[in-house]
Image (tube, rainbow, N blue to C red):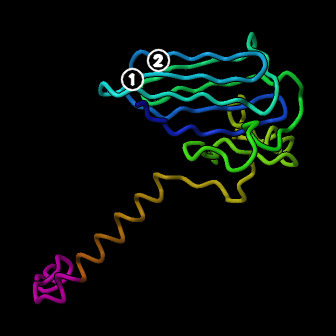
Amino acid sequence: MSRHPTVKWAQRSDKIYLTVELPDAKDVKVKLEPEGRFIFSATKDSMPYEVDIELYDKINVEESKVSIGVRNIVYVIKKAEKKWWGKLVKQEGKPPVFLKVDWDKWVDEDEENEKAGMDFDDDMDFSKLDMGGDDFDMDESNDEEEETEAKEEETKKEGEGEPSTEAAEETKA
């Protein structure tokens, strides 16, 4: 009997992200059918794993991409029609227990355009962001810290009964 790996999903109006979490998977086989069927099989530690789900709607197999990594298998599935799906699978009732929302990739329908504007994968020039602070010189800061630490150490020695170098010089004079 085979097991089901955890499958995380998220969507945009034009695509579905499916991530199969199965580290060190061997003999990975992934199949996608235009009517919306996703089939996955692999083995880990001689134990077979498989997933066979019927997606909510039709998809574009040619424009979909898969990436098989050491830790997981990521499938970016292009939807046949650009629209939001109410759910991932066609079946009625509760979704399979191994199917979970990928909150790292999740974007709500009404926030999709807002998030696209904040996509940090693009070449963004952070120097143009005004962070509200004035110019700060790290070298000056370090010098001030060292002076403060030296004074604190000197004060501590005076408190322990040891004369400071300044006090010793005053007695000599």
> How many C-alpha atoms fall within 10 Å of the one at disc 1: few (<14), some, or many (≥20)?
some
Determine which residue is flagged by label 2. Answer: 28
Residue found 61% across the figure and 16% down from its top: 31
> How many C-alpha atoms fall within 10 Å of the one at disc 2: few (<14), some, or many (≥20)?
some
Asked whether, in this view, residue 24 is left or right of residue 78, the answer is: left
Please give the range of residues in magenta: 156-172
Q: Quadrant of residue 57?
A: top right
Residue found 44% across the figure and 28% down from its top: 49
Image: 107 above or below 4? below
Asked whether, in this view, residue 156 is left or right of residue 132, the answer is: left
Q: Of the residues shown, which amino acid type is indicated by label 1?
A: Thr
The answer to whether residue 173 of the structure is visible from this angle is no
Of helix, strand and loop, which one carries label 1?
strand
In this view, the residue in front, 165 or 98, is 98
Q: Residue furthest front?
A: 1
Residue 156 percent across, percent down from the top left: 21, 82
In this view, the residue in front, 35 or 123, is 35
**Count of labels shown?**
2
Determine which residue is flagged by label 1. Answer: 43
Position of the N terminus, as image quadrant, is top left
Magenta stretch encompasses residue 129: no
Residue 111 percent across, percent down from the top left: 84, 48
Magenta stretch encompasses residue 164: yes
Q: CA distance from mark 2 to mark 1?
A: 7 Å
